[in-house]
Amino acid sequence: SQTIHQWPATLVQPVGSPLSLECTVEGTSNPNLYWYRQAAGRGLQLLFYSVGIGQISSEVPQNLSASRPQDRQFILSSKKLLLSDSGFYLCAWSISGSSGELFFGEGSRLTVL
Amino acid sequence: SQQGEEDPQALSIQEGENATMNCSYKTSINNLQWYRQNSGRGLVHLILIRSNEREKHSGRLRVTLDTSKKSSSLLITASRAADTASYFCATAGTGRRALTFGSGTRLQVQP
């Protein structure tokens, strides 16, 4: 069966520090991969999605970047965090080529101080 | 702006009552999906309804879709305290590869 792992679960970082959140999927090949951000009590904002290795689409201009170095690995990064980067980051995957359901990780809560 | 907007933002009911949440969206869609999120956790897929469907059932869930009004509703019948969570609609727009989520309805079911 397919599983998705996302880490770290929580982190507190100072403004200006770098960020790396990692997500891996097991049990499937060539998944679509997504990073969403959720502000407190709000809906999800799509940040990045990827349909294949090295293929990244960005939805909004921001202080973040994403990379897909391997088929089932998706990394969210920042060189210098801003206060506004605080939030709950969710990685998700879906079957390639579908507009079907998303399978979410458990999320990473980032607090920038 | 969010493609989907849920209504109400918050809903509090007693166990055994039915809960109805509504979702409106703006553009053409291939399908509409509903997800559930327990506090501090990831989202879990509940049900998907395609643009050519009008109603779908899954256990205690009933979803309707009105593409002429660009709206959907999620009905949870005979609610339980364990149904307490936030519920989000998400749309798969035509020509888009990613889902767009609404702002969610926070459901509280009192035991």
Image (cartoon, coloured by chain):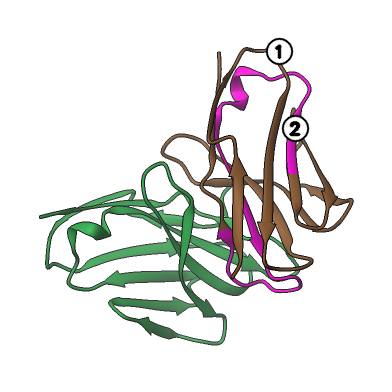
> Looking at the figure, which quarter contains the C terminus of chain B?
bottom left
Tag 1: Cα neighbours inside 10 Å, few (<14), some, or many (≥20)?
A: some
Residue A91 percent coordinates (x, y):
62, 49
The residue carrying mark 2 is A77
Q: Is residue B67 visible to the viewer in this orientation of the structure?
A: no
Which disc is residue A16 wearing?
A: 1
Where disc 1 sits, the SS reads: loop
Residue A36 in the image: state x and y as whole percent.
Answer: 62, 46
Q: Amino acid at mark 2?
A: Ser
* B107 in magenta: no
**Chain that bears disc 1:** A
Queried whether the magenta region covers residue A94, the answer comes back as yes
Residue at 61% across, 55% down:
A4
Could you say which quadrant of the image residue A30 lies in? bottom right
Mark number, residue B9: none
Give the magenta-colored segment's residue range. Answer: A75-103
Distance Cα–Cα, label 1 vs label 2: 13 Å
Does residue B107 lie above or below B21 as drawn?
A: above
Q: Is residue B49 left or right of residue B60?
A: right
The amino acid type, in three-letter code, at marker 1 is Gly
Along the line of sight, which residue is nearer the eye, A9 or B62?
A: A9
Q: Is residue B73 visible?
A: yes
Q: Quadrant of residue A85?
A: top right
Residue at image location 56% in from the left, 87% down from the top: B52
Q: Mark 2, chain letter?
A: A
The chain painted brown is: A
**Mark 2 surroundings within 10 Å by alpha-carbon count, few (fewer than 14), some (14 through 19), many (20 or more):** some
Q: Colour of chain B?
A: green
Image vertical order of residue A106 relative to residue B61, above or below: above
Relative to the observer, which residue lies in front, B9 or A64?
A: A64
All told, the count of numbered labels is 2
